[in-house]
Image: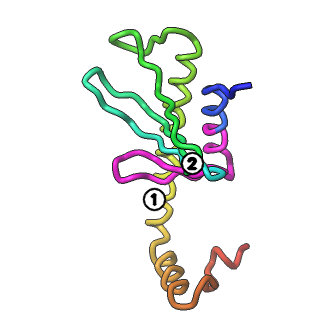
Amino acid sequence: MALSDKLILGYLTQETQAANPVIVWTELSDGGFQTDINGVNIELSEVSTRAGSYLSLSFSAPSLGTVFLQEPQSISLFGRKYRDDDARDVAMLMRQLKSLAEEQCEHRRVRAFERKDEIRQMLFHRLLFGSREPVTSETRSR
């Protein structure tokens, strides 16, 4: 039985927004997002064309190659009207996934800024002494 696009997008969305997310997205220099799950590299990017823009997900693994999942195109000039309910659901899930990836990356960026001195000390300590981390307010509470 083939796995549907909606099932995969639902899984990615659910695991990205979980309280302790299994999926951790990183922001790419081109504005897209990337994660790796069970040896499958996933990239989420926005593709611009003359007709507009759409989201694209690529799934790749060295031994298997790459497949793409693209946001269905709206059939109306204004608004979001799709050829059927499945296309609408896939488009909505892809937009939601992009929004969740943006939120996740922004949250980490803000948190890193707020803790920049502590993070600096942890990185320098790791550089000099290996993976043992110095005792900090956060590591004390673990």
Quadrant of the rendered structure where residue 73 is?
top left
Q: Which residues are magenta?
A: 12-36
Foreground residue, 25 or 47? 47
Q: Amino acid at mark 1?
A: Arg
Q: Is residue 120 magenta?
A: no
Is residue 51 found left or right of 19 in the rendered image? left
Residue 41 position in % (x across, y down): 54, 49
Q: Marks 1/2: CA distance?
A: 28 Å
Whether residue 63 is visible here, answered yes or no, is yes
Quadrant of the rendered structure where residue 32 is?
top left
How many marks are shown on the rendered structure?
Answer: 2
Q: Residue at x 48, y 65 (%)?
A: 112
Foreground residue, 124 or 12? 12
Q: Which residue is mark 1?
A: 109
- Please give the label number shown on residue 15: none
Instruction: Judge the density around disc 2: few (<14), some (14-19), many (≥20) Cα neighbours within 10 Å.
Output: some
| Pointer 1 or 2: first along the chain | 2
Q: Residue furthest left?
A: 50
Q: Residue at x 50, y 85 (%)?
A: 127
Q: Quadrant of the C terminus?
A: bottom right
Q: Which residue is mark 2?
A: 61
Q: Residue furthest front?
A: 63
Q: Residue at x 48, y 12 (%)?
A: 82
Quadrant of the rendered structure where residue 48 is?
top left
Identify the element where label 2 is drawn. strand
Residue 77 position in % (x across, y down): 33, 11
CB under 8 Å between discs 1 and 2: no
Residue 59 position in % (x across, y down): 54, 41
Above or below: residue 9 compared with residue 142: above
